[in-house]
Structures are given as structure tokens and as C-alpha cells.
Image (spheres, coloured by chain):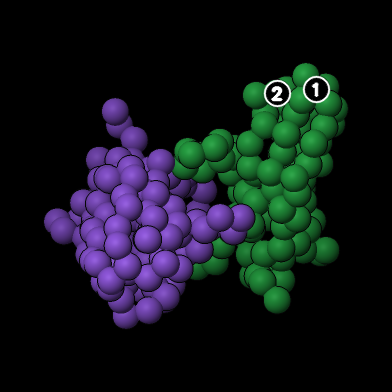
Chain colours: A purple, B green
Amino acid sequence: GAGVSQSPSNKVTEKGKDVELRCDPISGHTALYWYRQSLGQGLEFLIYFQGNSAPDKSGLPSDRFSAERTGGSVSTLTIQRTQQEDSAVYLCASSLVGGPSGNTIYFGEGSWLTVV
Amino acid sequence: QKEVEQDPGPLSVPEGAIVSLNCTYSNSAFQYFMWYRQYSRKGPELLMYTYSSGNKEDGRFTAQVDKSSKYISLFIRDSQPSDSATYLCAMHNTDKLIFGTGTRLQVFP
């Protein structure tokens, strides 16, 4: 389809392992966002990419979290040395342009991460 | 204090009822206000978008923004069981959206 694609859809990992979550945005979208949603919580901003600009990493909760976006398209969120509190749904979103405007932000269906 | 406050519910109403969902916020700089709907195990989808103060209507849905009170609302008329979902308010802060915690709505037949 033409929507935001995320993989894996579900991931169970052992505490201390590293995980990589992938996001394939809608073709042509220059802005890409990562959010985290824990049970009963709203969406927590993690990181934002806009074109070739330096990403806004202000939401990353610790240095165990990192993300990159290659070629202005696919993005990978990496969590090192996972902890149980990292268990959440990791949502990726993209929009045609970034910034506070009327453009629509489209979300993927999320990667459900469980750390045991 | 969170930038955006939203009652998590759950809110349970009979089919046909009028539903009122609300958020308050603290940052007077917010200009763009959205409502997202999220079905279980799905990503959020944009339902309504409003710029600055005022009302916007789309079918059974009406979004209201009162910037003087820092209060936004979403009304659903003639609610249907298919409206059962979590509704999240969101506001633009520079380049990112700030979300409320979401209100879980259950419409029973």
C-alpha cells in the first residue's frame, strides 16, 4: 500500500539485547517522526527528521536510543541494552512537509515491543 | 503540569448519544489543533484539524477551539458503535505534535 510501513509489527526481546525498528514513510514525504506509546499513555515524541536538516532529538529518553534516516527515506530506530520500561508501541509517522501547518501527519500501525 | 491534559476515560455511551471530548493546554503559542482517532492495535488517524479559535464541522463531528480558555472540544453526534476508539487531541509545538493521553470511548448498541 501507499501508507507508512513499519517492521517488525511485533518484537519480543530479552532484557539487555539491542533492537532495531524500521520505518518506511510515504513516498515523497520529507518529514518523519518517531513516537512512543505506553499502555494508558499518550504519544511521547522521540525524534523528528526534516529533509536534510539536523534531526530534532529532544525527545529521546536516554543515550540508549538513537535513530537515523538514510537517503531521506527509510528510518531506523535503535534501542541498545533494552530495559523492561522500553516495552511500548513505537509509532512512526510522516508528512509531506514539516512544521506547524495544515499538512496531515500519517501514522504507521506501530511496532509492538515487549522486553522480557 | 503536562502541556496537554486529557481525561483518559473510559467513556461509555449508548448508540445515538452526543459525545463530548475535551482537552486543556497550557501553551498559549499553540495555533494548530487536531483530533486523532485510534482503533485498537492501529496507528492514529487524523479526524479533525482546526487552526486558531472557532468551530469546524465535518459530518457528525464538530471541533471547537477556545484559545482564551485554552480548551478544545470534539463533539460526536448520533454516536455509533463504530465510533468506539481512543480519541487523542494534539497540538503543534514548533515542529512536533504534542498529544494528550487519549480518551477511550465505548459506544454500546
Residue underneath mark 1: B15
Residue A53 is at least partly visible in this image: no
- Which picture quadrant has residue A19? bottom left
Q: Identify the residue shown where x is 65% and y is 51%.
A: B102
**Which quadrant of the view contains residue B108?**
top right
Q: Point out the image quarter for the C terminus of chain B.
A: top right
Residue at the disc numbered 2 = B81
Of the numbered discs 1 and 2, the one sitting upstream in the chain is 1
In the rendered view, tell whether residue A55 sits above or below residue B44. below
- Asked if A3 appears above or below A71 in the picture, the reply is above
The residue that appears at 23% across and 66% down in the rendered structure is A18
Q: Residue at x 72, y 57 (%)?
A: B6
In-front residue for pair B9/B37: B9
Q: Secondary structure at mark 1?
A: loop
**Looking at the image, which residue sits at the far left?**
A71
**How far across and down, in percent of the image, does residue A71 sit?**
14, 56
Q: Chain of mark 1?
A: B
Q: Amino acid at mark 2?
A: Pro
B96 versus A97 height, above or below: below
Of B96 and B109, which appears nearest the observer? B109
Subunit that carries the residue with mark 2: B
The reply, left or right, for residue A41 in relation to residue A96 is right
Do the residues at pointers 1 and 2 share their chain? yes
- x 50%, y 56%: residue: A37
Q: What type is the residue that disc 1 sits on? A: Glu
Q: Would residue B59 appear left or right of B77 to someone viewing this image?
A: left
- A107 in relation to A45, above or below: above
For label 1, count other residues whose C-alpha is less than 10 Å away and answer few (under 14), some (14-19) or many (20+): some
- Residue A91 is situated, as x and y percent measured from the top left of the image, at 41, 52
Image-based side of A14 in relation to B109, left or right: left
